[in-house]
Image (cartoon, rainbow, N blue to C red):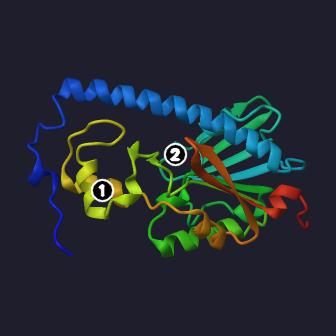
Amino acid sequence: MAPIATVADVAPAGSAGAPGERSWARDRVKAAVRRTSAANRDRRWALLRREVCWDDVDHVVDLGGTAAFWRGCPDDLRPRRVTCVNLAGDPGRTVVGASEITVVRGDAIDPPVDPAAADLVVSNSVIEHVGDDAAVGRFAAVVRANPAHVVQTPNRWFVVEPHLALPLHFALPRRARIAVVRVWDKGPVHRDRATATTRVDGIRLLDARKLARLFPEATVHRERGLGHTRSLVAISAVAATGRRAR
């Protein structure tokens, strides 16, 4: 394949704008992303309230989760115990109302706790970050070890890539995405090629078909935005009905 020009080939180093201009624009984009994310979380909790049977869910293991996500959970849905497994998390316990949220540091592919022992396994926007197809398969196997599971991920074909706030990202080959991410990542930036490459390669979005193959016992629900499927939520039949063998 013919080589694709890098950013350095097509634009001078300062072409993304002066530092002050980049900072102002980036802050505006980040603020818009935060507002959108907050609205999306509210809609996701409404979906989980409607589609998941929370009866007898006492303990949730959240692979890649954070305490902040569960602090934002509606009080009547928040389980008595939540264990978040996160590579970058600060270990500790937080009490929110009648719930105890514990963060343990660990890899979601090889978690230090047993997800199968929980009443429900949850994962939000994690599967697209675990690595190549083999790593994605291992992660899915960890989740499926518990028949009651909920896995959310952004839709590969949504018009805006949510991690980068980059429109029509799926139309770009990898080298072009790297070139763009050198000057744009939730707003204008200026970064070297190695950093941009790490950023791009750390995101491997899934579509509905692949998510369904990874979680065959689940129904894939589609969250809508801008007239398109924004994200996908796989909810297993056991999570939906609460009918788990004990």
| Residue farthest toward the front in the current orientation of the protein | 227
Are the residues tagged 1 and 2 within 8 Å (C-beta)?
A: no
Q: Is residue 197 left or right of residue 47?
A: left
Q: Residue 172's image quarter? A: bottom left
Is residue 48 in sight in this rendering?
yes
Q: Amino acid at mark 2?
A: Gly
- Helix, strand or loop at label 2? It is loop
Which residue is located at x 45 percent, y 62 percent?
204
In which quadrant is the N terminus drawn?
bottom left
Residue 60 is labelled as none
x and y percentages locating residue 19 in the rendered image: 18, 28
The answer to which quarter of the image holds residue 218 is bottom right
Q: Say left or right for 192 vs 129.
A: left
For mark 1, give the secondary structure. helix
Report crowding for label 2: few under 14, some 14 to 19, many 20 or more residues within 10 A (C-alpha).
Answer: some
Residue sitting at 83 percent across and 56 percent down?
240
- Disc ID at residue 89: 2
Q: Earlier in the sequence, mark 1 or mark 2?
A: 2
Residue 214 in percent (x, y) is at 63, 71
The amino acid sitting under disc 1 is Arg
Front residue (pair 52, 170): 170
Question: Which residue does the image show at 41% across and 31% down from the upper left?
Answer: 30
Q: Quadrant of residue 186?
A: top left
- Which mark, by number, is residue 177? 1
User: Disc count in the image?
Assistant: 2
Q: CA distance from mark 1 to mark 2?
A: 28 Å
Give the image location of residue 24, x and y in percent. 29, 23
Q: Residues within 10 Å of mark 1 (few under 14, many from 20)?
A: many
At horizontal 81% and vertical 50% (from top left) the residue drawn is 52
Name the one closer to the observer, 180 or 106.
180
